[in-house]
């Protein structure tokens, strides 16, 4: 059976966009619980999006250095399957919520992914994003994919500046378990473009032999 790279569309802010994303073939959606982000969602808004989704879609909650109580509040009110931590959270912090989690890494040439895979060994994967000083994620910038080692103990989720124009090359060069896109499929910040999502999914599907 040919392997298909999984796709997460992040930064969803409406039920309509979430359903459109799923219909296009995405495997997971991301809800941003980080107030400075233009894609931030309130708990009630996120709950409505999560309730509208069909089975087998991974609902991901994104946090940046959150308070413990805020994460618990989100989990109490929103049907979340996976946590995503984009700040300086320790492995101990990420593991305390009894939910699968992924840890975002802001990539630099000196980043030791093998050491990070050991540090966050209980995570479901490492999400690799571009490093921009002072910006925790969603930069729309691409990093050098050659920095990713061929062998890594954890699944790689590739993010950072992906669009329909480069995602095929990204998959061919780095063979990630999944790709994560937000700004690259938007009409405006927080509003997804059906055309861009379809084009993105077509490029991902074209990598299946």
Image (cartoon, helix red, strand yellow):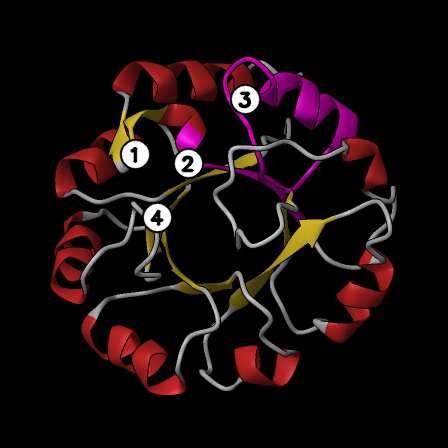
**Residue at numbered disc 2:** 182
> Circle 1: is it few (<14), some (14-19), or many (20+) Cα within 10 Å?
some
**Residue at numbered disc 3:** 204
Residue 208 visible in the displayed image = no
Mark 1 or 2: in front is 1
Viewport quadrant of the N terminus? top right
**Which dot marks residue 156?**
none
Q: Where residue 183 sits in the image (x, y, percent)? A: 41, 32
The answer to whether residue 29 is left or right of residue 201 is left
**Residue at numbered disc 4:** 57
Q: Residue at x 30, y 46 (%)?
A: 39
Label 1 sits on a secondary structure element that is loop
The answer to whether residue 102 is left or right of residue 56 is right
Provide the residue span drawn in magenta. Answer: 156-183
Q: Nearer the viewer, residue 180 or 189?
A: 189
Pointer 1 or 2: first along the chain = 2
Label 4 sits on a secondary structure element that is loop
The answer to whether residue 58 is left or right of residue 84 is left
Pointer 1 or 3: first along the chain = 1
**Residue at numbered disc 1:** 189
Mark 4 or 1: in front is 1
Label 3 sits on a secondary structure element that is helix
Mark 3 or 2: in front is 2
Pointer 3 or 4: first along the chain = 4
Q: How many marks?
A: 4
Q: Residue at x 87, y 44 (%)?
A: 149
Pointer 3 or 2: first along the chain = 2
Q: Where residue 197 sits in the image (x, y, percent)? A: 36, 22
């Amino acid at each position: 059976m040919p392997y298909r790279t999984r796709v997460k569309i992040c930064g969803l802010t409406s039920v309509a966009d979430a359903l459109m994303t799923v219909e296009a073939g995405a495997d997971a959606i991301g809800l941003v619980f980080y107030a400075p982000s233009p894609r931030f969602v309130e708990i009630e808004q996120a709950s409505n999006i999560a309730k509208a989704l069909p089975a087998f879609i991974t609902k991901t909650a994104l946090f940046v250095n959150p308070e413990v109580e805020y994460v618990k509040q989100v989990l109490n009110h929103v049907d979340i399957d996976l946590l995503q931590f984009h700040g300086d959270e320790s492995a101990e912090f990420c593991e305390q919520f009894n939910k699968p989690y992924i840890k975002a890494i802001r990539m630099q040439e000196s980043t030791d992914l093998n050491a990070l895979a050991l540090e966050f060994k209980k995570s479901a994967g490492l999400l690799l994003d571009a490093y921009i000083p002072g910006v925790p994620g969603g930069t729309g910038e691409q990093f050098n994919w050659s920095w990713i080692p061929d062998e890594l103990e954890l699944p790689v989720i590739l993010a950072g500046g992906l669009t329909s124009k480069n995602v095929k090359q990204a998959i061919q060069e780095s063979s990630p378990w999944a790709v994560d896109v937000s700004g690259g499929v938007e009409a405006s910040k927080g509003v997804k473009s059906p055309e861009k999502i379809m084009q993105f999914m077509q490029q991902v599907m074209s990598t299946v032999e």
